Structures are given as C-alpha cells and as structure tokens.
Amino acid sequence: MTLATPPKNAVALAAVCLTSLMFGLEISSVPTVLSTLESVLHANFKEIQWIMNAYTLACTTVLMGTGALADRFGRKRVYVVSIVMFGITSLICGLAQSAPVLIVSRFFQGMGGGAMLICQVA
C-alpha cells in the first residue's frame, strides 16, 4: 500500500460518512426553507405539511423491507441502488415546479434515504 492510494476500507468509510451527512442534511434543511417553498410553489398549509412529512413517512416505512432485501441481494448492491435513488430524487426535488411534484419526489427520496440508513448500519 502506498500513500497515493487510500486503503479500500477508508474509501468505504468515507462513502458511508458522506451518505450519512446527506441523510442528516435532508432532514434538517427543509424546515428552514418552508416559507420560501410556500411562496415559490404557491403551496397551502396542507401541502407544506406533506412536504415535511412525506420524507419521514417513507423513510420509516422502508426500514424493515430494506433489511430483508439487503440480506437477499447483498448490502452493497442495495446500498448503491439506494444512493442512486436518493440522488435522482434529490435532483427532481430541486427541479420541482409544483407542490404535488415535490411531495411525491420527497416521498421517493425518503425511501432512498431510509434504505441508505439501514444499509449504513450494516
């Protein structure tokens, strides 16, 4: 091993730490921009509540199922798929032009985030 190439375990640890950071930022970032979302998307109070709750509901819903999928298909494979899903849905959230699109994309983002969370532990 040379100093130029980090060990395989260090790369894996860095990836897990970065996805953990993404998960935490996603939970804490939306409450700070709710008033902006309300004015830009012309969302009502019910839609704002769903924008907040869709992520949390989806995240907690997939935990048990993802564990079973990870046991069956491999933790690394499910982890990579969940990271890709989280990234794509994050892009869709950023490009959303209406509250319903943002709610649905936040739900799928929560599914990816919950899958990332359960695979990080393993």
Image: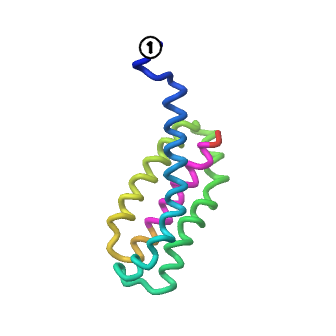
> Quick check: 85 left or right of 40?
right
Q: Is residue 94 left or right of residue 61?
A: left
Q: Is residue 6 magenta?
A: no
Residue that lies at the very extreme toward the bottom in this rendered image:
44
- Marks counted in the figure total 1
- Crowd band around label 1 with a 10 angstrom C-alpha radius: few (<14), some (14–19), many (20+): few
For image coordinates 64% across by 39% down, the residue present is: 122
- Residue 93 spot, x, y in % from top left: 39, 64
Q: Residue at x 50, y 48 (%)?
A: 82
Question: Is residue 106 covered in magenta?
Answer: yes
Q: Position of residue 104 (x, y in %)?
A: 45, 69
Q: In front here: 2 or 11? A: 2
Q: What residue does disc 1 label?
A: 2
- Res 70 quadrant in image: top right
Residue type pointed to by label 1: Thr
Residue 57 sits in quarter: bottom right
What is the basis of the colouring in this image? rainbow
Query: Bounds of the magenta span?
Result: 105-120
Residue shown at the point (58%, 65%) measured from the top left = 56
Look at the magenta stretch and give its main secondary structure. helix
